[in-house]
Amino acid sequence: MRSRYTAYLLGDQRYLLSSWHPRTRPTGLEIDPACKWIGLTVHEHRHIDEDHAEVAFTARYRIGGRAHRLREHSRFERIAGHWYYLDGRIEEC
């Protein structure tokens, strides 16, 4: 999760797409250059089994000087030793 947050911070579309699960990966990804990521808090990390995990987090960002929060409960799956972002449920802040 932290590596994907850092990729959003740096605008690294290639890493974001390569770390997305092949079954749910979009064909493309646009990152808003006006969005400035300013912090990540991981609230919970839970291993379901050796190949599945969940992470609950809040990511903070600014657009046009206004602060926002994104709360998400994400699911990850390990394939051939690599963890992939499967999907997430966004929660209202």
Image: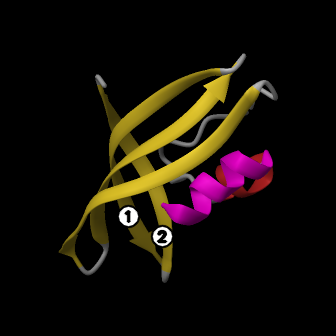
Front residue of this view, candidates 90 and 26:
90
Q: Is residue 12 left or right of residue 20?
A: right
Q: Is residue 29 left or right of residue 58?
A: right
User: What residue lies at 31% left-to-right and 74% top-to-bottom?
Assistant: 51
Residue 93, label in figure: none
The segment highlighted magenta reads 1-11
Q: Main secondary structure of the magenta part?
A: helix
The answer to which image quadrant residue 38 occupies is top right
Q: Nearer the viewer, residue 60 or 26?
A: 60
Q: Which amino acid does the dot numbered 2 rest on?
A: Trp
In the rendered image, which residue does mark 1 sit on?
A: 77
- The residue that appears at 48% across and 43% down in the rendered structure is 59
Instruction: Judge the density around disc 2: few (<14), some (14-19), many (≥20) Cα neighbours within 10 Å.
Output: some
In the displayed structure, 45 sits above or below 93; it is below
Tell me the quarter of the picture where residue 61 sits. top right
Asked whether the beta carbons under mark 1 and mark 2 sit within 8 Å of each other, the answer is: yes
Residue 19 x/y as whole percent: 60, 59
Q: Amino acid at mark 1?
A: Glu
In the image: residue 80, left or right of residue 13: left
Identify the secondary structure beneath mark 1.
Answer: strand
As for residue 9 lying within the magenta part, the answer is yes
According to the image, label 2 marks what residue? Answer: 83
- Quarter of the image where the C terminus is located: top left
Q: Earlier in the sequence, mark 1 or mark 2?
A: 1
